[in-house]
Amino acid sequence: MAERWGPYRVLPASRVRSQTAYRRSFVLDVLGSVSIGIVEFGEVYIIFANVDALGGLDFAGVALVFALANLAFAVADLAVGHLDQLPRYLRTGTLDAFLLRPLPVLAQLVTSDISLRRLGRATVALGILAAVLPHNDIAWTPARVILLVAAPLAGTAIFAALFVLAGAVQFWLVEGLPQWLGWCTPLAAVGIWCLALLGWRTGLRHYTGAGS
């Protein structure tokens, strides 16, 4: 078992050492990632500087949702965000080297790179979560504690799956769209409207009135 997982430990470790070798560059990259998280949260703060509640949530509630969602995205981006390099592997033929190794290709791609600068965004999300959690009036129960832990984990899994799906599409697109795909836009609009109207009519038939 140790021999099986050995290559997966060696590859990320080498990437971590190479990124931390140039400390000034590494710190600047992390600060850049931190600034992205701060700017995004600043947008939420600006909105709530003008309103007291939005969608039934006050600032503390929205900040909690923001922190959980941003933490999930940041961890998924750290783990598999580098799959956006797949088009380059396809163009240069680098993917062939992954196919020759007796290891799952997706596992090789996931462990082939790691961008520690993306930790900055996750750190901001954790900081916001720790800051706003006490300001939410939550009656804590064991189930809610489990939900608090499970929410970012499940969110990470969802975002990671979307990254992998986007990478899979590149086997057909390779950073380009077929020219005929542009003509599908009107068909897509018609299809979406048919689906929307079907949902609307179904909902309207399901509505039984307010009882007055």
Image (spheres, helix red, strand yellow):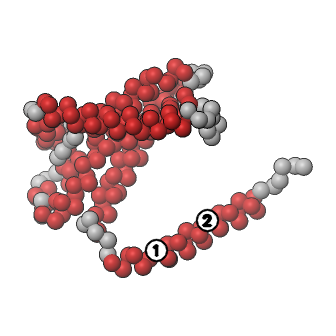
Left or right: where 79 falls relative to 125 = left
Element class at badge 2: helix
Query: Which of the 4 image quadrants contains residue 199?
Result: bottom right
Res 185 label: 1
Coordinates of residue 132 in the picture (x, y in percent): 49, 24
Residue found at the far right of this picture: 212
Res 196 label: 2
Residue found at the far top of this picture: 134
204, above or below 61, in the image: below
- Please tell me which residue lies in front, 163 or 133: 133
Q: Are marks 2 and 1 in contact (CB under 8 Å)?
A: no
Camera-nearest label, 2 or 1: 1
Element class at badge 1: helix
Q: Would residue 86 be seen by someone viewing this image from the given angle?
A: yes
Coordinates of residue 27 in the picture (x, y in percent): 20, 31
Q: Residue at x 87, y 49 (%)?
A: 211
Res 109 label: none
- Mark count: 2
Q: Would residue 151 be seen by someone viewing this image from the given angle?
A: no
89, above or below 118, in the image: below
Rounded to the nearest angstrom, the CA distance separating label 2 from label 1 is 16 Å
> Quick one: quadrant of the N terminus?
top left
Left or right: where 8 falls relative to 67 = left
Query: Which of the 4 image quadrants contains residue 87?
Result: bottom left
Packing grade of label 2 (10 A; few <14, some 14-19, many >=20) is few
Q: Residue at x 60, y 71 (%)?
A: 194
Counting residues from the N terminus, which is met first, the one under dot 2 or under dot 1?
1
- Please tell me which residue lies in front, 3 or 18: 18
- Please tell me which residue lies in front, 24 or 84: 24
Which amino acid type corresponds to the residue marked 2 in the rendered image?
Ala
Which amino acid type corresponds to the residue marked 1 in the rendered image?
Thr
173, above or below 23, in the image: below
